[in-house]
Every structure is written in C-alpha cells, then in structure tokens.
Amino acid sequence: MHSTNTRPRTAFAAINLDFFTTLVSRPQHPQAQLKQLFRDIDVDKNGRLDLNELRAALCKLGLPSSEDYLREMMHQYDENQDGTVDWAEFQKYVGRREADIRAAFEKLDAHWEGRISAAALEEDLQHAGLPAGRDDAHKMIQLLDRNKDGVITYDEFRRFVCLLPAAQVVNHNTLFCWVDSADYMDGVECRLCMIPPKHPMQRLLAGGLAGAISRTLVAPLERLRTIRMTGRGSESLSQSVEAMWKDGGLRGLFKGNAATILKVFPQSAIQFATYDCVKDAFMAIFHHKPGSELRQAEKMLAGCVAGASSTVFTYPLETIRTRMSMAGGGGLLTSMALIRQHQGLGGFYQGFTPALINDIISNGLGFWSYELGQTLYRRCHNGKSPSPQERGLIGACTAVVVMSVTMPFEVIMRRLQVQGSPGHPVLYHGLRHAIVKMARDEGPGAFFRGSLSSYLKVAPSIGATYFLYALIVQLWGIRGLRRYPHDDRQQQGSRQAAKAANGSRDCAKEMAKVAPHV
C-alpha cells in the first residue's frame, strides 16, 4: 500500500482506472493541438512567426521577452535563419523535444492521471524544496489553464514548454520556470532570488570544468611563467624555454599540470559558485529588483569573497604545484614528501599572506571589470548580451589589466613558496622582508619578473575559462529564467490582464458560495 506522498511507477495496482481511460483517449500524434498553438501565436495569419508575435506570446505567459531570450528562441526554431519561424520549422523543433516535454510532464503528474492538479503540483513543489502552498499551486494552474477546468493537460503544459529555451526542458528546470512565470505575472517576484536545489552543485562543476580545461591548454606557458618568476639573474626568455625542454622534453612542458588540475578544479569551482551565490544573496538582502544590476561596489565585494574563499581551501595545492613546476621538483607525492620533510605542515602555507592579498585583489578587480565589460558591451549593442565567445574575449582583456596590478604580489608569493626547495635557498623571512630585500638587491623590476610570459599565459587562460563557463551555464540551463531580464514595458499589460482575470475568477467563486443562501 502506497501513501499519498509516494509516486507509484512500477506498482500497477496503485494506478487508478482513470489513468488507463486518459491514456486510451489521449491523441497519440496531437498535431492538431500543436497546429492550433502555432495559429494562436501567428496573429497576422501569414503562416510565419516573427519577433513581435513571439514577444506577445511570451508576455502572456510571464516569460522573459528580452532580446537575449528572443534571440535564443529564434536560434532553436529558425533553421534557415530568415528571421521568422514557419510551421515546418516549428513542428520539427517541437518534434525533437517531444520526448523531453513528455518526460517533464510525467515527472509533475504525481499520480499518473494524465493531468496536473493543484494538489499534485503542491506535492511537486514540496519535493523540489520550495516553500510553496496550495495558493501558489493554484496561481500556477491559472497561468496555463486555458479551459479553466482547474487542471493542466499535456497540451496546455506543452504550450508553455514550447516557449522555453531547450536547456530548461528538463524535470525541475521546467518546474522552476513555471514558478518564476507565475510569480512574475502575480507581481510577487519573491522567489526569483532563490536558487534551485541542484544549481549550486552545477555551478561548482561548471566552474571546475572551465578552469581545468583552460589551464591544461596553457600548461606550458604556466610552467614557463613560474620558472621566470622564481629565477634570478639575467636568464633570457629563450634560455628559460630551452631549460624547460631539457627537463623532460614534450612531457616536461606539462610538468606539474596534474597538480595544477587538482588545484584549479576546486579553486575555479569555488570562485565561480561563490561569486554567483554571493551576488544572489546581495540581490535578496538589498531588495534589488530581479533583472537589475548590482551596484559596482557589491560586484567587487562578491569577487573579493570568492577570491578569499578559494585561496583558503586550495592554497596547499598551489604550493605543491609550484614545487613540481621547478626543475628537479619531482612528482606529486615526491613534492609533498619533500615539503613535509623540510618545512613541516607549515611549508604548505609558505607565502599564504601575499597569496591571499593577491587573490582578494585580483578576483575583486577581475569579476568587477568583467561585469563592467559586459555592461559596456550591452550599452554599445542596444541591450544585447555578449555570447560565450564574446564573454571570453572580455575576460581576456580584463585579465591583462588585473595582472598588471597584482603582478608584484604573485612574484613575492612564488619566491616564498619555492625557497627551501633544492636549488632555492631560504632568503626571505616573511612578506615585509621579501619586499625590502627584493627592492634593495634586484630593483623594482624584480616585482615584474616574468611579466611577458604571464601575459602570454593569463590572457588566453582567463579568456578560455570565462568562455567555457558561460557556454556550460548556457547548455545546462543554470539559473533558469533568471538569466534573462524582463521587459517591464511589454509585460505590464499582461500582468494587468492576468490580475483582472484572477479577480474575476475570485469574484465568481464568492458569488457561487453566496448563491445557495440567497
């Protein structure tokens, strides 16, 4: 015997007879309903859907109607790229997504009844971790309920999902899009700052993958940069490259990359996830309107928090990676053993203070300048957001600026990390002593040693990281509809119409209650 909160999937005895009746009566190829949806959107009845018609359809459902959202819709529908969507293109896209739409519907159809009721939807919201009640479920039902029978059929559900980006047509993503649209039409906008339960983990994974892949691509430049920073004397760039090649040939170019990935994956994951989560928290704490921009100081503070968090958790891996990159540094386990043998556990945190300062400053400036670059891009392109490729280019440009500011801190950190290892005697007794001694013995140029190799490595590395992160976020549908701003001028009329309709329904319900007593 199943309780009312369970979802029978394999126990046929728990499926009521209504399910079989619904299954038999359901059209197996509901092309007529799909054709009617196309006609409803096609206001001028010319057989083609243009941007204005799509925008009007989006507004009626509380979906974003910004240029970014419309451009993504056109990208998935408009195969011949003529700026409109004909019936063949519309039918073909929906046909490709039919299985995903059906799976999302059945996931929400708690008791396999062939329809979604307010009670079933309330159960779905609770399973998804949302603090929503029956009133919230009723508002969501009212948004999609075309025949006003109090339940959502597959056809009504599909009319909504057809206008979602492809990445959102999966289980909980679809549910959260539905929640956000109903909230927006009702003028609530209180849950738009919430993060779906699985998205923090997705953000961590997206950031980690982006960082690991980009660093692997520039691993030879990273090792060259480390050698240049920690070396002394007048060794030229070509001599450093030659020494690196002699220390292992082709494999030597990637020496230390295993430790780099072990360090960069969690570091990049923590940075991006923390930055996004802190921004979401600021939006909620300071009551910013969803879709609006945070203040510049808030963006910089979020970046500083992200940098500090990642450094605290991953600095020992950075020390190991630096030791492995040096000539004769050995492998991962060997480097760890040597650090433990000669410096003890404290050796893993040599140079931590300048590293923390460097990462707080670099991440604060980096994320702030990256966001500023995106804002300037939108201003120059009539509100259009940059593509993942353009975000990568913006990130590369801002990385050069940030590197110029933070270079001295990183040089000091590298010197402190490697001293005490073979070929690198202990010369400094802390951050202040290192600054004074380097300035006195080597001059101001010592603080920018390895700058050329740093620029050659940092620009493509950071650019690739931002590109990959933006691409993964887009493909996975992270942040749902909150990635797209609403056009309030377009949505205002739809909101008023929805509220008027809801008011009429509430009035009718009250009259029905009073009528028997009159």
Image (cartoon, rainbow, N blue to C red):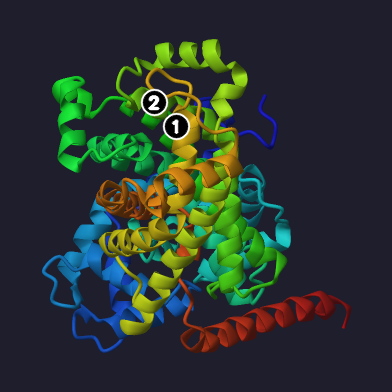
Residue at the spot 56% in from the left edge and 72% down from the top edge: 296
Residue at the spot 11% in from the left edge and 69% down from the top edge: 80
State which quadrant residue 162 falls in: bottom left
User: Which residue, given by chain and number where applicable, does mark 2 sit on?
Assistant: 259
User: Which residue, given by chain and number where applicable, does mark 1 sit on?
Assistant: 263
For the residue carrying disc 1, how many other residues have a C-alpha within 10 Å: few (<14), some (14-19), or many (20+)?
many
In the displayed structure, 92 sits above or below 256; it is below
In the shown orientation, is residue 426 left or right of residue 241? right
In the shown orientation, is residue 304 left or right of residue 514? left
Classify the position of the C terminus by image quarter. bottom right
Image location (x, y in percent) of residue 104: 44, 48
- Rounded to the nearest angstrom, the CA distance separating label 2 from label 1 is 6 Å
The answer, for residue 470, to whether it is visible in the render is yes
- CB-based contact (under 8 Å), mark 2 and mark 1: yes
In the shown orientation, is residue 491 left or right of residue 35? right
Which amino acid, mark 2? Ala
State which quadrant residue 343 falls in: top right
Residue at the spot 23% in from the left edge and 35% down from the top edge: 220
The answer, for residue 149, to whether it is visible in the render is no
Query: Relative to the observer, which residue lies in front, 131 or 514?
Result: 131
Image location (x, y in percent) of residue 459: 29, 54
Query: Relative to the observer, which residue lies in front, 102 or 195?
Result: 195
The secondary element bearing badge 2 is classed as: helix
Query: Relative to the observer, which residue lies in front, 306 or 194?
Result: 306
Image location (x, y in percent) of residue 113: 53, 45
Which amino acid, mark 1? Lys
